[in-house]
Amino acid sequence: MKSFYWMGLVPVLWVLLTLRVSAHLGMPYVVLEGRAGKFPVRVVVQEPDVVPGLAQIGVRILEGEAKGVTVLPLHWDTDRSGAPRPDPARPVAGEPGLFEGELWFMGAGAYGVVVEVEGEGGGTLVVPANSLATARTPMPRWMEILLAVLGALLVFGWVCIGYVTFRESTVAGEPRGRWWRGLLGAGLATVVAMAAVWGGRRWWNAEDSNHDARVRDQRVILTVTSDRTGLEFGFDEPAWRGRSGVWDLVPDHGRLLHAFVVGSGPAPMFLHLHPEATPEGVKRSTVGDLPRGDYHVFLDVTHAMGSTQTLTNRLVVTEPILGGGFTDPDDSRHEGRSSPLGESHPLGDGRVVRLDVDGRLRPREAVRLVARFREADNRPSLLQPYLRMPGHAVVASEDGTVFSHLHPAGNLSMAAARRFALRAGGDAAAKNADVVCGDLGALPADVVGRLLASGEVTFPMVFPKAGSYWIWVQARIEGQIRTGFFRLDVPEG
């Protein structure tokens, strides 16, 4: 890399080749399963790993035959009038009903991917996605060498041009080919070349520092502390202080913050919390009993611009937290060993929940996690609304690098989906987004009744890599939050 610095050439190419991002703790996929008109569809957006960068869009028509699919990127600060023309998605050979497309995300922040399914009874839905630089990878060594050689040739050619130009240039009456003039020209060309290299290196270092600052500042830093009664959550947003209306937090399905505390060992502690702000502005949760130990903390937030983040930090509890109830009636906890996939996990009072996978379990391929809650006599449990949904699920890799909070419609933010739908199609589209996201408050009463009486909740999911995962599935039954805990191994694809 130093060799390229001193040649100072093609910095734009350098930027395009070296800047990469990774979002959502190694979870770069946003999944939405809903309806576009009469067509049930599953949309998977792989967020770009550069800014600007290409987002990969996959749209699967689950029932029926669509004539075509178009996709459109909608930036958070524009409406439909300022967006480009939609791009047609390509049918995938050998995969009936599957369409794929690519969209450029040109700016940082958040985008809404507007998916329109064409055909009789077709319709539109919007999937929110992030466009934020959060990491980078080094330039390949062969590329460094290639650019250094090309740079050296360019500088050598520039010096030769200076030498020949000064040596062969004459005024009336003077002979041509004076070698000392050629050396003077070569010297001047060398000075200009070194000045250009020095200036290019200064420019590149400044851009590199600016990029590092953007990467650092786009991360909201989470702090978690404990005392004898509960936990406190704090945020540090260096680059976003004072930018009201852009980086402010907004509620998602009824809560501003969704916190998850995960312990270690074969029977890890699991807490699902919703911290509340104190009069001093501190976000706080009481957690009942929490023993000494080392915990991972994950916090889901949605910003006013429509971007989402999963913040994480480590919590070491040196003095146990004793007594007291939860801050929020929808808070919950679970402690115990996991059950294998496909087997029943006890919930108490004779109730059980079983978790199965519908689809090919492979990395980077969408599947459905199907949770079936049953009574002691094997009847479907009657579920009750839980945070405006039939149920929730949490997926975390055992190494802590992947985390996803799932809803029956997917892992997207309902608040972000509603915001982009409002920009794309007004109030009617926003109400439709609530329906697509499975908000029980937006569905007809008879539909809600059937969903809750089935005792079954499905969660679309894409596992980004092979490995071992923990999965917690939650539902409310007879006023209590019941949690099932499972372990899942995703094989290499």
Image: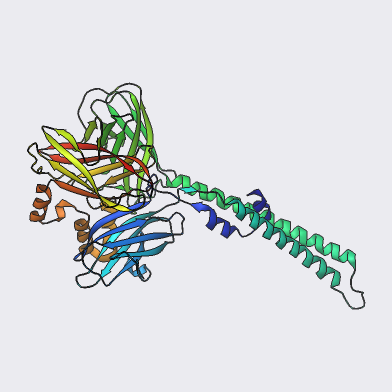
- Report the side of 335 relative to 110 (left or right): left
Residue drawn 36% across the image and 71% down it: 85
Q: Nearer the viewer, residue 193 or 33?
A: 33
Query: Picture quarter containing residue 417?
Result: bottom left
| Residue 324 location (% of width, % of height) | 21, 26
| Residue 384 location (% of width, % of height) | 12, 44
Residue drawn 89% across the image and 66% down it: 179
One can see residue 78 in this view: no
In this rendering, the count of numbered labels is 0
One can see residue 179 in this view: yes
Residue drawn 37% across the image and 65% down it: 101
- Report the side of 364 relative to 388 (left or right): right
Query: Picture quarter containing residue 403?
Result: top left
Work out which residue is located at the far top of the displayed protein and give it: 319
- Give the color scheme: rainbow, by chain, secondary structure or one colour: rainbow
Work out which residue is located at the far bottom of the displayed protein and give it: 172
Q: Is residue 288 above or below residue 63?
A: above
Query: Picture quarter containing residue 157?
Result: bottom right
| Residue 377 location (% of width, % of height) | 7, 38
Q: Is residue 345 above or below residue 13?
A: above
- Report the side of 209 relative to 415 (left or right): right
Q: Nearer the viewer, residue 348 or 216?
A: 348
| Residue 104 location (% of width, % of height) | 42, 63
Residue drawn 35% across the image and 22% down it: 318
Q: Nearer the viewer, residue 465 or 52?
A: 465
